[in-house]
Image: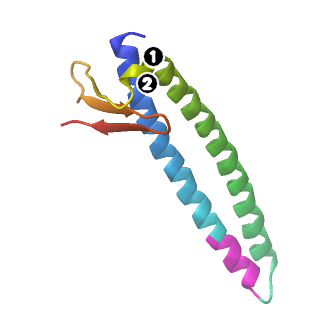
């Protein structure tokens, strides 16, 4: 893995984590909407349509979330394959000209990545 690839791998992991968080927020909002619609005592066609649209959006969101999680796992596996076990627990700096430094700490159960200034 080159220095550029290492940096972009870390950057991609950060981006994927943010995207996954966003998909979770969308799903939570969809569940709130679904609950509100389910509690209505009388439904009309528009309510049913909103319910169906909400479910369709939630299904797409779930599929997107699964794809993001799969890519995140692949990126983290690449990183773990590159960082030797003896370097676990050591803070590693990733630099790329024109970009802020990234600091990574690989542990057995988690990968911590922080942006420098």
Q: Which mark is residue 9?
A: 2
- Judged from the image, the secondary structure of the residue bearing numbered disc 2 is helix
Crowding at dot 1, Cα within 10 Å, few <14 / some 14-19 / many 20+, comes out as few
Q: Residue furthest left?
A: 117
Picture layout, residue 50 above or below residue 59: below
Residue sitting at x 59%, y 64%: 28
> In the figure, 105 relative to 39: above or below?
above
Q: Residue at x 58, y 66 (%)?
A: 29
Asked whether the residues under the numbered discs 1 and 2 touch, taking CB atoms below 8 Å apart as contact, a structural biologist would say yes
For residue 79, above or below residue 64: above
When asked about the image quadrant of residue 88, the answer is top left
Furthest toward the bottom, the residue is 41
If the image is split into quadrants, where does the N terminus sit?
Answer: top left
Q: Residue at x 46, y 39 (%)?
A: 110
- The residue range painted magenta reads 32-40
Q: In x, y percent, where is residue 66?
A: 66, 42
Instruction: Looking at the picture, tell me which residue is in the foreground, 44 or 104.
Output: 104
Q: Which color scheme does this rendered protein use?
A: rainbow
The label on residue 20 is none
Determine the CA span between mark 1 and mark 2.
11 Å
- Which of the labelled discs sits on residue 82, or is there none? 1
Can you give x and y, in whole percent of width and height, for residue 104 in the image? 34, 31
93 inside magenta stretch: no
Image location (x, y in percent) of residue 95 = 25, 21
Q: Earlier in the sequence, mark 1 or mark 2?
A: 2
Question: Left or right: where does residue 31 sit relative to residue 79?
Answer: right
């Amino acid at each position: 893995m080159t220095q550029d690839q290492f940096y972009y791998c870390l950057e991609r992991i950060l981006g994927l984590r943010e995207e996954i968080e966003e998909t979770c927020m969308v799903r939570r909002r969809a569940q709130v909407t679904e609950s509100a619609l389910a509690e209505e005592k009388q439904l009309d066609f528009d309510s049913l349509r909103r319910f169906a649209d909400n479910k369709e959006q939630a299904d797409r969101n779930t599929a997107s979330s699964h794809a993001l999680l799969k890519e995140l796992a692949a990126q983290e596996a690449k990183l773990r394959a590159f960082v030797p076990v003896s370097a676990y627990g050591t803070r590693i700096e990733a630099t790329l000209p024109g970009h802020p430094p990234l600091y990574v700490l690989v542990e057995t159960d988690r990968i911590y990545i922080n942006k420098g200034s």
